[in-house]
Image (cartoon, coloured by chain):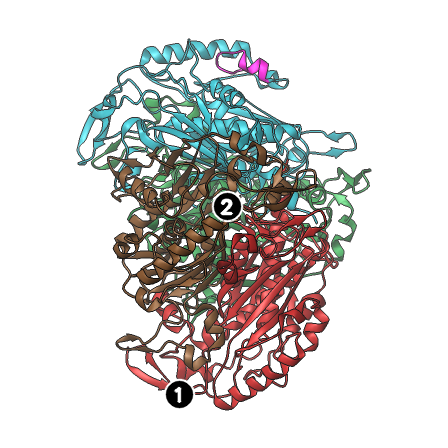
Chain colours: A red, B brown, C cyan, D green
Amino acid sequence: MSGNTIGSLFRVTTWGESHGAGIGVVVDGCPAGLNMTREEIQKALDRRKPGHLLSETSRREEDQVEILSGVFENKTTGTPISLLIRNRDQESRAYDKLKELYRPGHGDYTYSMKYGIRDHRGGGRASGRETAARVAAGAVAAKIIGRFGMDVIAYTIMLGGIFSDQGKNINVSHEIVDATPLKCPDAEASLLMEKKLAAMREDGDTVGGIVEIVVRGCPTGLGEPVFDKLDADLAKALMGIGTVKGVEIGAGFDAAGKTGSENNDILTPEGYLTNHAGGILAGISNGNDILIRVACKPIPSIAKLQRCLDESGRAVEYAISGRHDVCVIPRIIPVCEAMVGIVLADHLLRIRAARI
Amino acid sequence: MSGNTIGSLFRVTTWGESHGAGIGVVVDGCPAGLNMTREEIQKALDRRKPGHLLSETSRREEDQVEILSGVFENKTTGTPISLLIRNRDQESRAYDKLKELYRPGHGDYTYSMKYGIRDHRGGGRASGRETAARVAAGAVAAKIIGRFGMDVIAYTIMLGGIFSDQGKNINVSHEIVDATPLKCPDAEASLLMEKKLAAMREDGDTVGGIVEIVVRGCPTGLGEPVFDKLDADLAKALMGIGTVKGVEIGAGFDAAGKTGSENNDILTPEGYLTNHAGGILAGISNGNDILIRVACKPIPSIAKLQRCLDESGRAVEYAISGRHDVCVIPRIIPVCEAMVGIVLADHLLRIRAARI
Amino acid sequence: MSGNTIGSLFRVTTWGESHGAGIGVVVDGCPAGLNMTREEIQKALDRRKPGHLLSETSRREEDQVEILSGVFENKTTGTPISLLIRNRDQESRAYDKLKELYRPGHGDYTYSMKYGIRDHRGGGRASGRETAARVAAGAVAAKIIGRFGMDVIAYTIMLGGIFSDQGKNINVSHEIVDATPLKCPDAEASLLMEKKLAAMREDGDTVGGIVEIVVRGCPTGLGEPVFDKLDADLAKALMGIGTVKGVEIGAGFDAAGKTGSENNDILTPEGYLTNHAGGILAGISNGNDILIRVACKPIPSIAKLQRCLDESGRAVEYAISGRHDVCVIPRIIPVCEAMVGIVLADHLLRIRAARI
Amino acid sequence: MSGNTIGSLFRVTTWGESHGAGIGVVVDGCPAGLNMTREEIQKALDRRKPGHLLSETSRREEDQVEILSGVFENKTTGTPISLLIRNRDQESRAYDKLKELYRPGHGDYTYSMKYGIRDHRGGGRASGRETAARVAAGAVAAKIIGRFGMDVIAYTIMLGGIFSDQGKNINVSHEIVDATPLKCPDAEASLLMEKKLAAMREDGDTVGGIVEIVVRGCPTGLGEPVFDKLDADLAKALMGIGTVKGVEIGAGFDAAGKTGSENNDILTPEGYLTNHAGGILAGISNGNDILIRVACKPIPSIAKLQRCLDESGRAVEYAISGRHDVCVIPRIIPVCEAMVGIVLADHLLRIRAARI
C-alpha cells in the first residue's frame, strides 16, 4: 500500500501532478451493470469549478474528463474504470520563482525531505488539483450508493468565524445547497460570509471554515469492526483531504462534555429520539442519518508578505502574486461528498461478506 | 481486509470477545533484532488497569500476557508476535438478562443487524476489553519508535466539562502524567475532575472527556500521500477506538476560525515559530511535535433507568446493576498512546521505501 | 502485508514456531452464521497426523486445537476466529547441535541472512509444523465452501518415481483416499510406493512426489482478473507450501506441447467435452472441476552424511539422528486441501461484489 | 483488492480493454530518485511487438506510451507513475460476429457468467493486449532491480514440442536471446521451431511452449514467509498471465522424482554446488540464480472450424478469419520478464523492513 489508493473492495487510486500532463483515477472494484456516462462524471467535476463572484483562481479549470476503460455501451463491466483529466494550463514558468522556496503551510518542505525531490510546479502532487480525481471517482461511488437509496449532502456551516444557524440545515437538499454561492443553506449567514470573504480579499488574507456532511438513507450494518469501523474509515478519508484538520461524528467534541444520560440515543419502536451518535454505533451504521463535520484550515497561500526558508536553509520573504482563492469553501464541498461516497460504496460491498 | 487488522507493514490483528476464552493480538511485520520481554508488554497492560479510588469496574482485570511466538531469547525474530491474554473472569450469567436487550449507546443493535447473531456477554467483540490487545501491540510498537527517538504521551485535558490549563501541559512527561489519578498534568483541574467524577457516581451517570496526545522526536518524512497521510492514518486509528467521536490535529477546529496569516507556521533557520499544523504538513511529518486531540463520549452504561428495545422490537426499561466506570478516562489514555504508536511504527517502516 | 496473511476477504494469518509455546491462526472475515465446533477443526488436524506404519516423526504430535474467539454457542459470529495449538513437546535440546549449522535444503541460511537472527529449534518458523495452523484454518474454509456445494480432494499420483494410474482416480472420494496409507487411490501403485518408502528408509534417504487436487462443485465465476485470477491465487497458495516446487492447472505443462485444436475444451449444450483448462478460463472458474497438480520435493533432512556450512562459514558434515519422515506425502495432502479451500472461500466472498 | 493490482509496496494497477480508448497502468510505490525517460519504457514495449516473419497479428501494434505523472525532469518523484497507451486501431466491427459467441479457450463465457456483461470486442479486458501495460510497468521495475545489480532474462526452451538443448542456455544474455526470432538461444532448435510454426500456420492451428526465466544477481533475503514467499509471489505473478498453465521453480516437477540426497543443494565456502532449489529456500532467495519455467498453452483462436455455444446456449460453429499469431511465444517473453521484475522490485522494497 503505497498511499495513493483508498478502499478495500471499491478501490480508488489517484495519480497526477498539478502541472504535469494530467490527473486521473483508476476505480477498481466497481460492480458490473451500473449505468454510467461521461456526462454524469463531468457534471460532478463541474460542481467543483470555482464560483464566479467570490472566489477565483488564477487559471480557469475547464476540466474535461475522459472514460478510458471499464464502461461499455454506457454500462460498467466490472473491470477497472480509468478516468483522465488533461491539464490544460501547464504554464509552469509562473512557479519558477517558487522553485527554491519552502512555502509556509504547504508540502514543499515535507515532500523535499521525504523524497529528496519534488515537482515544485503548483504544489505538484500536493496540489488541491488532485482532488478533481477524487470527485470523478466520487461520481462513480455515487452511482453505487444511489442504487441503495443513499444520498450524501455537504454544506457550509461556518466560514471565517461566521456560523450558520444549524437549525436551518435540517431540510437541506442538493438544490438548496447548490443554489447558494457558498453552499450554505442559511441565507442570512451566507450573506455575512460573502462579506467576510470580500473583506479578506481586500486584506490579502484567507479564512477557513467548517463543513457538515449528512448521509441519508444509509442502511443498518455498514462498517467493519474493530479497525475498519465506518467512522474510522470516514475519518481517514476526510482527514486525508489536504485542508482538513479535524473530523467529528455526530455530537463530536460536544459529546465529550455531556453525561451518559444526555448523550445516549434512545431507540424506540418509532425510531431514535436523538442522533448524538451521528448514525454510527460501535463502528456500524445504525440506520440513522450519518452526521459528520470537518474543520478546514485557511488556505496558506496569502497575498501578504510572509517569511519562509529556501532550499539552502536561508530565511527569505515571499508573497504570492496573481489571484488566488480566499477560502477553500465552497470548492471543498464536492470533495467531501466524494470521499464520503467512496467510503460508503466500499462498505456497501464489504457488508455482503458479513453473513453466510 | 476484514476489519480486525490495522497497518500496512507493521500489521496488528486483534481478536477476542469480552467473555470468551481470551483476547489477543498478532503483530506481523515487527522487524527482527529488537529486545523484547514479556515484562515490558505486561507493564504496558498494567497501566490500563482501573485506578483504585475514582473509577472501578465490576471485575478486577488482572491481565497476564503471554508471548506465544515471534520472540526468541528475548529478541524479535521478524516472525509474527502472537500475544495472548486469558479472560480470567468469564462469569457470564450476569449478562444473561441483557441477552435480549439492545442497550443504548452500545453495539448490541448494530452487531445484531449486521451479523444476525452476537455474543451478548459483556458486549462481546465490541467490549472495551478488546483494547487490551491494542495496548499489548502498542508495547511492541513503542519499542520500534523508541529506537528512533520518538515518544508518545497522552493526557487528559478535559473531563466532565472541566478543562485543564493547557499552558501547564507543555512540559508533560510520562512521570508527571502517571503520577496523577486522572492522568491530567494540571493538578488544580485534576482535583475538580475528581470531584466531578464522585458527583456523577452519586448521580448514577457518566461523563466524557478530551485527551491530548503529543509525539516528540518524530523525524521529518513520515506519511504517505495522498490517502495514507500521517494525519489520515492517525485519525482512523483513533476514531476506531469505540469511545472516540472526534479527532483533531494541531489547531484542529480552531484552525477553521483563523486567517491564513494567523494559522501559517513560519519556518525559520531556528525552527518553526508556531505549531498550528500539529507537526504534519501535506500529510507528512514536518519535524515539529505531533499534536492530536480526541473527544471521548460518556460511557453509555449508566445506573439510571433508560428506555431501549429488546430483540423483538418492544420498548423496555433497564438500568445497569453493579459498579461500572464513570468515565473512560483515564483508562483510554494508554489505548490512545498505543494506537498512535502503532501508526508511527508502520510509517517508520514505510518511509524506508520512499527513496531508491 | 508482512507475509503471514493470505486472502483478501477471508483472511488467514498464521503464527508460531516449531518449538515455541504454540502455533495458531487468526481467521478473519469468516461470515457469521456458520455452525462450527472444536471437534470439526480437531478432526481436520487429526488427518494431518503421521501414519503409523510407513512414516514416523521423532515426536508424536497430538495436537489439540482450542477455539479462543469468534464462535459463540457453536455458531460463527463474524468476528475473528482465533485458534491455538499448544506445542506439547518443546524439548529443544535435541536441536542444540544444529544451532550453528545451515542445513541443506532448509531455511537456516536464508532466515539468518534476512533477519540476522533465527529460532533454530526444529526449523523455527520455517518448520512444516506451521502447516498445522493452515489445516485448522482450512477446516473453517471447508465449512464455507461446503455450504456452496464445493468439495476439495487431494491424493497422491506419484511418490518416489512411481506413478499411479490416473485413470483410476476419476472417482476418487475422501473415503477412498483416506482408506489408503499413502492417500493414493490406485491400490497397485500404492503398494509399490510403500515398498519404495521402506527401501528409502533403509537407505537413509527421502523421496518426493506429486499430489493432484480436484475441486468438485465449483460454481462459475470465481476469480478476479487480471492479477487475482483464481489459478494465480491457487498457484500462490500452493507454491507457498514449503515443499512445493511446481504447480500446474489442468493439462499444465502438457498443454505446452499440444495444438490449439487439441487443447481447446469444447463447450456443448451438454457441457464441456474435455477439461484441459482445469476448470479455469481467463482466471475465472468455468463450472468444470478444478484440477491442480503440485510437485513436492524430497524432504531435505536425510540420515546420510551431508556437507554444509556453519554460521562462521566453515564447511562441516552432518547427518540427522533420530527418526524422520521419509516423504512429505501423505502428510502434505490435508495441507494442499486446506490451502485450496482457503483460496476458494476467499473468492466465494469476493464474487459477491462483482455485480450491482 | 479488486484483482487489477499486484504488489504490496511496489504496486502495479493495470486497466483497459482491447478495443476501448486505451490501456494503461499506474505504478505506485516507485521510489523517488530514479532516472526515467519515456524512451526507456517505449523500448520495453517495442520488444513486445510481433516479429516480422513468423508471427503476425491482424493489427499492427505501434504502441506509443505516454508518461502522465510521477516523473519530473526525468526523475521519479515518489508519486504514482501513470502510463497511457492509446488504442490506435479501435476498429471493432470485425468482432461483431463474435459478439454472441462463447469462443473455446477464451474468457467469453466466464466473464459473461461472472459480470452479466462483457466487452466482447477483441476479448475486452481478457485480451492479451492488457499485457502491454504490464510490460510498461516492468520497465519501471527493471530500473529498480537494475540498481541492485539484478537482471531478468527469459527465453524459449520448448515450442510446439521441440525442446532446446538447455545446456546451451547457460550463458544466455539479452543480446543472444533478442538476436533470435523466437528468442531461443539454441540456434539449431530454433530453426526447427520456425519450421514447426510455418507448418502449423499452414494447418490453421496453433502451438504452445515453455519459457525459462533466470534472474541473475539476486541478493540473499528476498521473500516474506510464510505466504508471501518469493516463489509463491512469482508463481502468482506468472500464473496470472492468461496463457500460463504451469509454473515451476528450480528442478520443479523433476524434484518430485529425486531423492533428498540428489536434490539437496550443498553450500560450500565456494558457493552452492547445484541449484535444484532455483535460488529460493524456505521462500527466501539464497543468493543463487533464480530459475523458473512456465508452460504456455496454445493460442485458442485457430483457423480451423470449432464448435462452441452462443449466448442463448445453442451449439454453433466458428472459425477465426484474418491472420492471427500461431504461438504466444516469443511475444510472451517480455511479459514474463516484466512480471518477474515487478515481484522482485516489490520484495526489494519489502526487505527493508525486515530488520530494525
Residue D170 placement, left or right of B97: left
Q: Earlier in the sequence, mark 2 or mark 1?
A: 2
Q: Quadrant of residue B39?
A: top left
SS category of the residue bearing label 1 = loop
Residue B135 position within the rendered picture, expressed as x and y whole percent measured from the top left: 38, 45
Number of marks in picture: 2
For the residue pair C193 and A44, the one nearer the viewer reads as A44
For the residue pair C2 and C194, the one nearer the viewer reads as C2
According to the image, label 2 marks what residue?
A226
Q: Amino acid at mark 1?
A: Leu
Residue found at x 71% / y 57%: A146
Judging from the image, mark 2 belongs to the subunit labelled: A
Q: Is residue A104 above or below residue C274?
A: below
Q: Quadrant of residue C285?
A: top right
According to the image, label 1 marks what residue?
A305
SS category of the residue bearing label 2 = loop
Identify the magenta region.
C174-184
Q: Amino acid at mark 2?
A: Val
For residue D4, the mark is none
For the residue pair B280 and C243, the one nearer the viewer reads as B280
Judging from the image, mark 1 belongs to the subunit labelled: A
Residue D227 in view of the camera: yes
